[in-house]
Image (cartoon, rainbow, N blue to C red):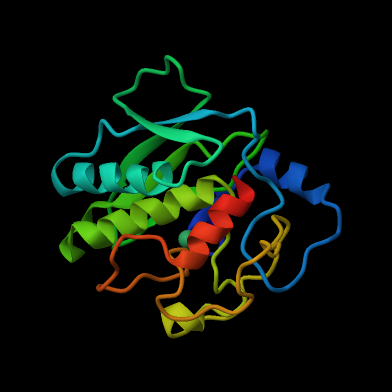
Amino acid sequence: MEVDGVVYVGRDAAVSLEASREMLQGDGSNTKEQYRTTNLVSSSVSVICVNGSAYTGSFSTALDRAIANYNNLGLSFSLKRTSGSTSGCSATITGNLTSGSAGGSSGFPSGGKPYNAINIASSTSQYGTSVLTHVITHEIGHTIGFRHSDYYNRSISCGSGGNEGASDVGAILISGTPSTATVGGSLMNSCFRSSESGNFSSTDVTALQNLY
Ligand SMILES: [Zn+2]
């Protein structure tokens, strides 16, 4: 999908031209069952800063919870909330607020760095802090290379929609994770429910610990 000259995969993850070129040089091992893009964040990235200066109230609380979701897992990188300072940051993701219907968008990694922004619709707050936490955690998931868990059939979480396809970003099975998606089975499903907890599922944790 293209909006204002930006190409999106899975409707909410932008692919820069740079990322696209890198990922076209894949190893051909892509399968139809999976979760991550060809591009990941480099192991040399130790601190990913998240500029949360635009987030107040429930957005601020949700961002803190989303950051804790990742930091609780002891991954190869940690997330550090900032108000714009880049001191000590290997890379920075800027949290933006957008208009329009509930949900968010972000993008996939390039050059070994996470995508540089998450865009969360202000209207998402109508569903409460746990859903906000879910959406922010989900969009950060794209920035470090996660595809939708039900990318091969969006109707699993969205009720309608088809196969997003591997596109040129890849859709690679993460070892130890299920190849089939279920409703509520992954924070990286395409669509969220009003009942989301904001927490990773057990297979999300497996996937994160496998990659990072
Ligand atoms: Zn998504």
Frontmost residue, 70 versus 7: 70
Frontmost residue, 163 versus 92: 92
Q: Which quarter shows the C terminus? A: top right
**Residue farthest toward the top in the current orientation of the protein:** 87
Q: Is residue 209 left or right of residue 60?
A: right
In the depicted structure, whether residue 192 falls above or below residue 155: above
- Is residue 30 in view? yes
Q: Position of residue 205 (x, y in %)?
A: 49, 58
Q: Is residue 32 left or right of residue 65?
A: right
In the depicted structure, whether residue 33 falls above or below residue 72: below
- Residue at horizontal 60%, vertical 34%? 113
Q: Position of residue 195 (x, y in %)?
A: 25, 73
Q: Is residue 7 left or right of residue 102?
A: right
- Is residue 7 in view? no
Q: Position of residue 79 (x, y in %)?
A: 42, 35
Frontmost residue, 93 versus 181: 181
- Residue at horizontal 63%, vertical 49%? 211
In the depicted structure, whether residue 119 falls above or below residue 190: above
- Residue at horizontal 43%, vertical 79%? 158
Q: Which quarter shows the N terminus? A: bottom right
Frontmost residue, 73 versus 151: 73
